[in-house]
Amino acid sequence: MPRHWRWLVPYLFLIPGGLWLLAFFVVPMLVMASVSLQTGSLGTGYALTWNFGVYPEMIGAWAPQFERSLWYSIVVTALTLAVGYPMAYTIAFRGGRYKSILLLLVILPFFTAYIIRTLSWKLILADNGFVLGNLKDIGFLDDGFRIIATPVAVISGLTYNFLPFMVLPLYVALEKIDPKLVEAATDLYASRVQAFLRVTLPLSMPGVFAGSLLTFIPAVGDFINAEILGSRDTTMIGQIIQRLFLNNNAYPEAAALGFMLMAAVLALVFVYARFVGADELTR
Amino acid sequence: MTATAFPAATERPEPVPIRRPTVGARISRLVLPVFTGVAVLYLFLPIAVMIAFSFNDPAGRQNITWQGFTLRNYVDLWGRPDITGPMVNSLIVAVMATLISTILGTLIGMALTRYEFKGRTGLNLLIFIPMATPEIIMGASLLSLFVSIGIQRDLMTIVIAHVMFNISYVVVTVRARIAGFNRALEEAAMDLGANEWTTFRKVTFPLIFPGILAAALLAFALSIDDYVITSFVAGRSITFPLWVFGVSRLGVPPEVNVLGTLIFVVALVFIAVQIWSQRRAIVARPEPGA
């Protein structure tokens, strides 16, 4: 290749993949924005009428599901953090030569299908399944007691499915911390708790941030857990969007909801980034 | 410098008498490992249930209570085209999506790590945003596109969607590998008279290959397991996750657990082989200076 064409090389490398992302990620987003402002029906066809009214209309119609999705996801993120942080901490600082095997155990769930894992939880939590059924038989639980179809079931399903997404980035962040820094803190008369709060925890914040994003974002749009483990009272916004799109063919309404979900996620991510103090998102 | 000149140094090995930890301190040191052990068991619980119920002999459609041990499900699976058909679709989609996304993503990863060019920030954003977008939004927007321009939805549109969400993950994985890459090795090859293509084939590619392989495995795993985006762009075609979800209301036949167990075992074998080959490579090729 002649020397003066050199500058072209990186573009040749990135153009095929870049075009794919433009055509099938960016363009669809724009099309969805346009669809949300159209009116019409599948039979008569759609026309762009700049119908912004669909946005307040959709918020009015599905506010409870929207709020519920955000709440569930916040609770799930907090729970995975509460369970995942001690796990990641133990693996990083106390794992020794078992580190890699412990990490492998953490990602073990990924070796089975997401849906099958969730269906297994349905089996475990079932009203008369082998867990609750036996506890009821010995009189430990009331016959009317149930977990399945309650918010607890949906939240615990989500927590289970996204726990590895929390542990892995936390582990990466904690692993990077030089133990000498913690030693220095204790040498300077910090108690172990103080050393953790003032040294380890702040240094692990990038991991907390990454893990929370990786948990919150998929959780808020998820509908598999709510569909399999929930009931009508636990409907999440993902289920609504999917039904409007695929069952009702209500494309403008569904597109408007999708866009608002995206906006809500971006807004929360931004607030959270300010709160945690992580300013480099792409790192 | 002798030890006698620095008497303090000889005393170093035992500066403080070892205090016997109190019972309370010993118990508190156990809290974290025990917690982690329980959490790992929790992660394994549904997998254990899946495996156990693949051997169950259910009376009716519902495979929810333990009836008795059988191996029949493992034989019956192969006579169930309604299950193996979607599985074959999933494999076709995953293989195609993995091939395309690995090639496109590796090229972008190389462009990002080895060249200076304009538009780097924009490209980084284009890679990051799909990973930060809820799957349902990507599925919904792709459906909007396909409906708007009247594209028939089938396995092809599933592949298009899977390649799209895989590219970012491939770029991130491959980039991490290339970033730790020693350019001096390539320069050495060129100095010894290799042209660019030979250098790439004999030096660059073998060195970044583990990263590409890891990226391809990740892409395959993401693709074969995807339900959300696939449900939007599948049209009438059915992949394995779509099929399982479809029948889950009526009761999941034990053959689904069998297939899940088989996938789990295959994945475990893959990982075991990878770990084993890495160990072997380390033994065969000692660290420089060792």
Image: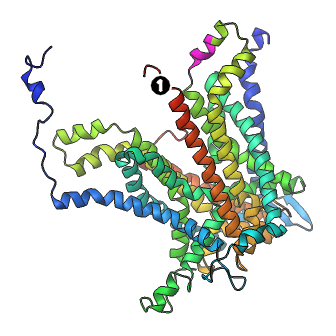
Q: Quadrant of residue A122?
A: bottom right
Magenta span: chief secondary structure: helix
Please state which amino acid type lies under the numbered disc 1.
Glu
Give me the residue at 72% from left, 39% from top: B102
Q: Residue at x 81, y 57 (%)?
A: B89
In this picture, is B184 found above or below A244?
A: above
- On the image, the x and y values in percent for residue B167 come to 70, 41
x 50%, y 75%: residue:
A152
Position of B43 with respect to A194 (left or right) is right
Q: Position of residue A145 (x, y in %)?
A: 49, 88
Is B38 located above or below residue A231 in the figure?
above
For numbered disc 1, what is the local secondary structure? loop
Front-most of B195 and A65?
B195
- State whether residue B201 is above or below residue B251: above
Count neighbours of disc 1 (C-alpha within 10 A) and say few if under 14, some if 14 to 19, many if 20 or more: few
Residue A264 lies in quadrant = bottom right
Residue B271, position as x, y percentages in the image: 59, 47
Q: In this figure, which residue is indicated by the disc labeled 1?
A: B287
* Quadrant in which the N terminus of chain A is drawn: top right
> Horizontal and vertical percent for residue B12?
13, 30
B278 in magenta: no
- Magenta stretch in the rendered image: B182-188
